[in-house]
Image (spheres, rainbow, N blue to C red):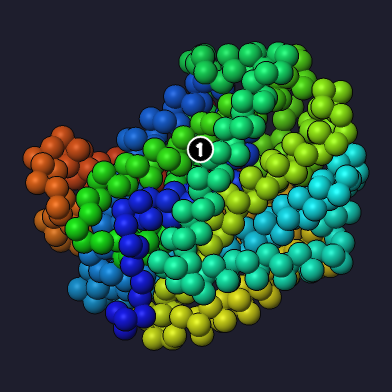
Amino acid sequence: MSGLRGEFSSRLGFILATAGSAVGIGNLVAFPVVATKYGGGAFLVIYIAFVVLICFPVMLAEIAMGRAAKKNPVGAFYTLSGESKFWSRLGGLAILTPFMISVFYSVITIWIMMYIVQSAIGNLDRLAEPAAFGEIVASPMLFVYFILTMSIVFTILAGGVKDGIEKAAKILMPTLMIMLIALVLFVLTLDNAVEGLRYYLIPDFSRIDSTVLRSALNQAFFSLSLGMGILITYGSYFNKEEKIVNTTGMVALMDTSVAFIAGLLILPAIFAMNPGVDVQTLSESSVSLIFSYLPQLFLEMESLLGYVGASFVATFFFVLVFFAAMTSLVSISEIPIAWMVDEKQFSRRKAIAIMALVGGALTVLASMSLGMVGWLSSMLNYGGINKSLFDVIYDLFFDTILPLIGFIVCIFCSYRWKRSDFMREIGQGDDKYASSLLASYVNLSLGTFIPLILLLVFANNVAQIYFGFNLLGF
């Protein structure tokens, strides 16, 4: 089966593709919103600390697992555990989770494409109306955009690792960065933007509490694609001669840089367009911000740029978000495809066809759960709230299972996979790694406080989402 598997042609290709999997809506919108609501500069400092001290070792572990086994998550857990079926079943969570997250991401990517078209044809004023979002996502035109979006995603995936994923990443990632920086430069010229910049860059540590800590860790973990099986799968395509530590560091730096630059865009824009804004009134939902608040923000640029100019900026931004969502969606969709190729011995074409059919059907149902079909719109009730199928997918697979998989990876690499083999894999090709402080830290942290923190995050998320109370209590 090795002939069916691909491999990245270069270190740059791996970095761009892996960073592309991490960079998405969470970086461009969710990060700035959460940073705004939870302390600005204080949140930023805590977030960066968590990326370095907690997320980076877990990233190393996942990539090392993939490269050592040359398998998808199920195959990696099975092979490295000495062919334990118990561990391979746990690895199955890292196949199911990205599959379901791809459904959620597909729905949002379809909406983004609809907003691109609407803003481009001059309907920005309609998008800014409070009722617009509900009307658009319940429109029958949704299914036309569904076909267009899925065609793009699976065309890229059909190209394989080198000719599909890697080539797309080499185009999309630099384009995304250029577009993002251009928008930041524009926003920083607006009156009162400096107030948002000051709030974002100057930390007020008196704002730090348990909510800030939990939000920063949740955002960092999600933003870097940990627990989704992506890094294990992409690690399996990583050349044995490359240095894991240096390359992983570049991925983490690129992902964090995009989130940081997005903060330079969104926070100054919020303060510029709404002088004296109470940040606590902003929605924490990235979906709400993208599709409800931002069109209003762009429409307010009409006085500066005219209606055509404001519509152009809105279209430009939604294209940027579409690129970010597309890179993530392609990467997430690759995980179940790799599982079918490795474990089921399907051809890549057959695996993509199955992914398109099953994932597409669930995407349609999730789309219809937002106002089109009653029983899908009120599928379950937990935490005192009626939840749609779309909500259930988000709550279960984003907020609940991701930290659990991270916990499993830490325990596996520390206590099941032979420790010496694990550390050797990380240090392969890097003679200085074994004697470094980083090696000592990774060896210690993955077997002690990192899994404890992730288990606490998992337990607290379950308590808050499904039962409505905070385990930490401060």
Left or right of 117 in this view: 331: left
Quarter of the image where one finds residue 179: top right
Q: Which of 397 and 351 is in front in this view?
A: 351
Q: Which of 3 and 232 is in front in this view?
A: 3
Q: Is mark 1 on a helix, strand or loop?
A: helix
Q: Quadrant of residue 231?
A: bottom left
- Residue at the image point whose x is 51% and y is 53% from the top: 171
- Residue 141 in sight in this render: yes
Q: Mark 1 points at which residue?
A: 258
The residue under the point 58% across, 71% down is 154
- Pick the residue in front: 30 or 126: 126
Count of numbered tags:
1
Residue 463 appears in the figure = no
Q: Residue 99: percent from the left, percent from the top?
A: 54, 67
How far across and down, in percent of the image, does residue 403 sit?
Answer: 44, 50
Find residue 87 and report its image quarter.
Answer: bottom left
**206 displayed left or right of 281:** left
Neighbourhood count class around disc 1 (C-alpha, 10 Å): few under 14, some 14–19, many 20 upward: many
| Up-down relation of residue 187 to residue 290 (above or below) | above
> Taking 275 as reference, is 393 above or below it?
below
Relative placement, left or right, of 410 versus 382 is: left
The spot of residue 185 in percent (x, y) is 62, 25
Q: In the rendered structure, which amino acid carries the disc numbered 1?
A: Val
At which x and y percent is residue 132?
Answer: 88, 47
Image quadrant where one finds the N terminus? bottom left
Please tell me whether residue 443 is drawn above or below residue 271 in the rendered image: below
Q: Which residue is drawn at 51% across and 74% down?
A: 158
Q: Residue at x 71, y 67 (%)?
A: 148
